[in-house]
Amino acid sequence: MSAYSKADMPKSTPENPMDPREELPHHLPAMRAFAISLTRNMAAADDLVQDAIVKAWSSFDKFEPGTNMRAWLFTILRNTFYSGVRKRRRDMPDPDGVHTASLFEKPAHDGRLAMNDFMVAFNQLSPVHREVLILVGASGFSYEEAAEMTGVAVGTVKSRASRARLRLAELLKLDEGEELVGSDPSTMAVMSRSAVRAA
Amino acid sequence: MLGRMSDKKDKPALRNTIEENLRKVYQEMMDEEVPDRFKQLLAQLKEAQNAPADDGGEGVK
């Protein structure tokens, strides 16, 4: 329609607030990441994201502009996940429970922690533990935000996060007095660069 | 090997290790390309919103 398709693309800025729905695409990658960590299954994750988008879309009048949209969307997504688990058993890992680990294939030469080992261990956690680690450990939400999103007390979030980390450490055998792998930043950088993504 | 289980604490070093890994994993998932179905879904929702009386979904493109 327009020769200036890029230039006059509407932008949501604080000075020029638009329909908050315009901001939704910006949060899609994070919603998918959260959904994958909950479902451990790409196809189920995308179905979950789709359901959450539809719900969010029809509830946008309840969204308060200026508040954290990602937290709001994550809350809808997790509520959809938990109600979906009850109805449809959405929380089914792929065969071998390691599908998502294939995203992070990397040979574990020299015995260091590899991303796929980490994912296999992570996927053995309970949904509640996966959730709390993604919210406060990876997404950067505060304990207070995570408490509000998950509908529990701040202290509960803290103890869940602590227990989830310990469980993960057990699964990864990081508790045997060996050198902790991730304590070397250059190692982590190399691991990240060399992570192979399966299509 | 499991002898020190009862001594375990949520130590800062352990916590940092795990959080670094979590952030890496999360970033990898974030970097996955968003499938087209979501662009289509948002376009459909937008059309339905612009033509609320028409529930047939035949919006003008």
Image (cartoon, helix red, strand yellow):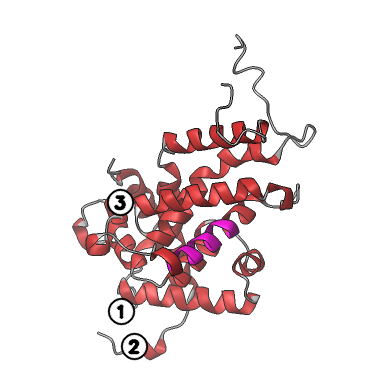
Query: Which is in the foreground here, disc 3 or disc 2?
Result: 3
- Mark 3 closeness class: few <14, some 14–19, many ≥20 residues within 10 Å: many
Does residue A102 lie above or below A6 as drawn? below
Considering the whole magenta stretch, tell me its main secondary structure.
helix
Question: Residue A26: where, in percent of width, then height?
Answer: 57, 39
- Give the mark, 3 or 1, whose residue is nearer the N terminus: 3
Say which of A99 and B5 sits in front.
A99
Label 3: chain? A
Instruction: Work out which residue is located at the far right of the displayed protein and give it.
Output: A15
SS of the residue at dot 3?
helix
Question: Residue A65: where, in percent of width, then height?
Answer: 75, 47
Does residue A162 lie above or below B17 as drawn? below
Q: Amino acid at mark 1?
A: Glu
Query: Which is in the foreground here, disc 3 or disc 1?
Result: 3
Picture quarter containing residue A93?
bottom left
Say which of B17 and A103 sits in front.
A103
- Mark 1 closeness class: few <14, some 14–19, many ≥20 residues within 10 Å: some
In screen coordinates, is A68 left or right of B33? right
- Is residue A38 highlighted in magenta? no
Residue at 42% x, 77% y is A166
In what quadrant of the picture does the N terminus of chain A appear? top right
Say which of A89 and A187 sits in front.
A89
Label 1: chain? A
Query: Alpha-carbon distance for marks 3 and 1?
Result: 24 Å
